[in-house]
Amino acid sequence: MAGLDGDGVIERVSYELCVLVAVKNALRRREIYVGGAARWRNPEEDLPADFEDNRVVHYENLRQPLDVAEFIAI
């Protein structure tokens, strides 16, 4: 079985590489974030503070439709 040595003990290097790959993928999908980091920060902090109050203005600036069905059809 992959990741096990001859005695059936988990090979630490293989395990650590699998964990690092999983963390990298989660960071890219923004499932997890790193506090204090610019690139990997909390995605909620990316939105302007007044986003909900000015949703129409922000969507216009992004040139995106407000209607979900229209957005998906694009």
Image: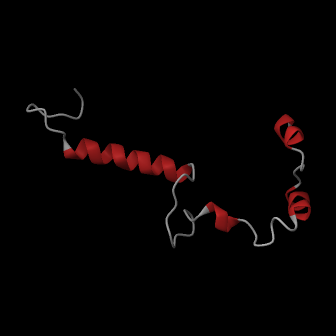
Which residue is at the front of the view, 6 or 49? 49
Q: Position of residue 7 (x, y in %)?
A: 8, 33
Image position of 58 (left or right of 25): right
Instruction: Report the residue at 49% width, 46% height from top.
Output: 25
Q: Quadrant of residue 8?
A: top left
Instruction: Report the residue at 46% width, 50% height from top.
Output: 24
Instruction: Report the residue at 51% width, 56% height from top.
Output: 32
Q: Position of residue 33 (x, y in %)?
A: 52, 60
Q: Position of residue 59 (x, y in %)?
A: 87, 57
Which residue is at the front of the view, 44 or 23? 44
Which residue, as the protein is rendered here, is positioned at the far left?
A: 7
Name the image quarter holding the C terminus: top right
Instruction: Report the residue at 52% width, 69% height from top.
Output: 37
Q: Is residue 45 above or below residue 59?
A: below
Image position of 74 (left or right of 5): right
Q: Position of residue 48 (x, y in %)?
A: 76, 70
Q: Is residue 39 above or below residue 32?
A: below
Image position of 61 (left or right of 7): right
- Total count of labels: 0
